[in-house]
Amino acid sequence: MQDEEWILFFEHDPNIQACTVHKDGKHYKMKEGVLISE
């Protein structure tokens, strides 16, 4: 997964529609929010 650009979708989150993910040591964290539609 480290070499791939994953996008995680939040179907029921009113503030963040999706985000990219990165690995921080043993854990995965949100890298940046992604706007799908306005």
Image (cartoon, rainbow, N blue to C red):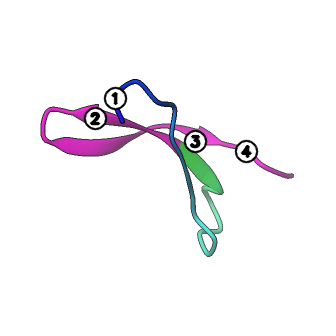
Verify whether residue 16 appears in magenta: no
What is the magenta range?
20-38
Give neighbour class at mark 1: few <14, some 14-19, many 20+ (Cα, 10 Å).
few
CB under 8 Å between discs 3 and 4: yes
Q: CA distance from mark 3 to mark 2?
A: 15 Å
Tell me which residue sits at (33%, 43%) in the image: 29
Judging by the rendered image, the residue that carries numbered circle 1 is 2
Q: Residue 38 at what x, y percent from top left?
A: 86, 52
Return the disc, 2 or 4, that comes first in the chain's sequence: 2
Judging by the rendered image, the residue that carries numbered circle 2 is 23
For badge 2, the amino acid type reads Lys
For badge 3, the amino acid type reads Gly
Return the disc, 4 or 1, that comes first in the chain's sequence: 1
Left or right: 23, with 27 as reference point: right
Left or right: 22, with 28 as reference point: right
Tell me which residue sits at (22%, 33%) in the image: 24
Judging by the rendered image, the residue that carries numbered circle 4 is 35
